[in-house]
Image (cartoon, grey):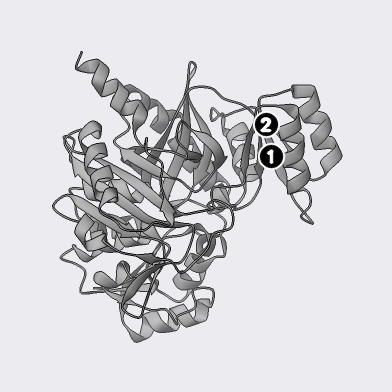
Amino acid sequence: MNILLIGSGGREHALAWRLAKSPLCTRLFTAPGNPGTARHGTNLPDLKVTDHAAVAAFCAAESIGLVVVGPEAPLVAGLVDDLKIAGIRTFGPTRDAARLEGSKGFTKDLCAACGIPTAAFARFTALEPALAYVRQQGAPIVVKADGLAAGKGVTVAETLDQAEDALASLFEETGAEVVVEECLFGEEASFFALCDGTRAIPLGTAQDHKRVFDGDRGPNTGGMGAYSPARVVTPEIEARVMAEIIMPTLAGMRARGCPFTGILYAGLMLTADGPKLIEYNTRFGDPEAQVLMPRLASDLVPALLSASEGDLSGVTLEFDAHRAALTVVMAAAGYPGAVVRGSVIRGVEAAEGEGVFVFQAGTRAEGGQLLADGGRVLAVTALGDSVTHVQDRAYAAVARIDWPEGFCRRDIGFREVAREAAEQG
């Protein structure tokens, strides 16, 4: 069948690489795509993803059998709804179901109603009541923009001054809504489940590195790297996450008339009291897709088709349990703030090899050269026997890339590397 993938980032390059491997995939199109996705199919830079009628018309003209929506913005904008109305099979949640990512307040209210373990919280639509609340609660405390913020609308305030500054900044926007949360303590992990509205299948774990600098310092980003599997999510914790978080969420969404179909990505804090939900994303993560896709041993396409048709019964997904993956994000100087675009990147092909992949995100091709064209630009990924092994392989690949204007964290996977070292005595 012909498949259309929506998006242009590193997640989409990883998905394009995996989808193109399926025997079911005849042709792969990516809209708009990037130079990396072009290696696995046909990019559609002129197809406006925000024009849902144009996307539907393209699907009809090219006999698209499945649309896979990568990023969150088209989901929240209702692309899945409009394509399904047009009779086009599409993988991803509807607009109402995507509120699990599009509105942190919606998700917190769902957690409260369904007894899903999460941080204590309060919601605000004005600055002064929010300031009064944080002054009453004290620091540390977490301040979040209610809506989509590309992973950067969160401030973990260690002081009241930081919390007050974050609130003042968020409420500069007209109509702003803010969630203020208790600060949870523990180790973070990412848990993925493939859902058909009623059933859910675990789809692997990862640990993201959100802060921009080594040692988890600096502002939050969309993710500076990740590794998989996250062994801190033990089989016992996985069972609790499914029973206490994922399945109650699916039940709560059905009860609200908006069953959830797609990828449910639970950001977890593994606290002394057990796993608690930090927030949901409603799609494959970025950079988590870059470590999940290389470990996946099953054909992804049949699973996505079954989920989109609302029936995952009998579907299994296998990951290589003996292989780890790690990805290092190379970002443009200045990220997550303003960045300069257009610098030349060399050596990507030299960095790649058996079990080493360079997934492209913020890039463009021009005049026979590869140029940086965003904040997070490359995701240098390695597959191997342990996190220690793949950390070494990924950074060796980074060293082969010639891009003076880029930077990366040098400690991706540091917690798991320390655990592996301790186990070896």
Q: Residue furthest bottom?
A: 61
Front-lying residue, 255 or 36: 36
Quote the CA–CA distance across marks 2 and 1. Answer: 7 Å
Say which quadrant the N terminus sits in: bottom left
Q: Amino acid at mark 1?
A: Val
Q: Which mark is residue 171?
A: none
Q: Amino acid at mark 2?
A: Phe
Front-lying residue, 336 or 306: 336
Kindly identify the residue that appears in the image at 40 percent across and 26 percent down: 240
Q: Position of residue 373 (x, y in %)?
A: 46, 66
Q: Which residue is mark 2?
A: 121
> Label 2's element?
strand
Q: Is residue 315 visible?
A: no
Say which quadrant the C terminus sits in: top left
Question: Quick check: 287 left or right of 76?
Answer: left
Question: How many numbered discs sit on the rendered protein?
Answer: 2
- Answer few, some or many: residues within 10 Å of disc 2's Cα (few below 14, many 20 plus, some between 14 and 19): some
**Above or below 259: residue 267:** above
Mark 1 and mark 2 in contact (Cβ < 8 Å)?
A: yes
Q: Position of residue 7 (x, y in %)?
A: 42, 66
Kindly identify the residue that appears in the image at 59 percent across and 42 percent down: 107
Q: Which residue is mark 1?
A: 179
Q: Quadrant of residue 181?
A: top right
Q: Position of residue 104 (x, y in %)?
A: 62, 44
Kindly identify the residue that appears in the image at 78 percent across and 55 percent down: 175
Q: Earlier in the sequence, mark 2 or mark 1?
A: 2
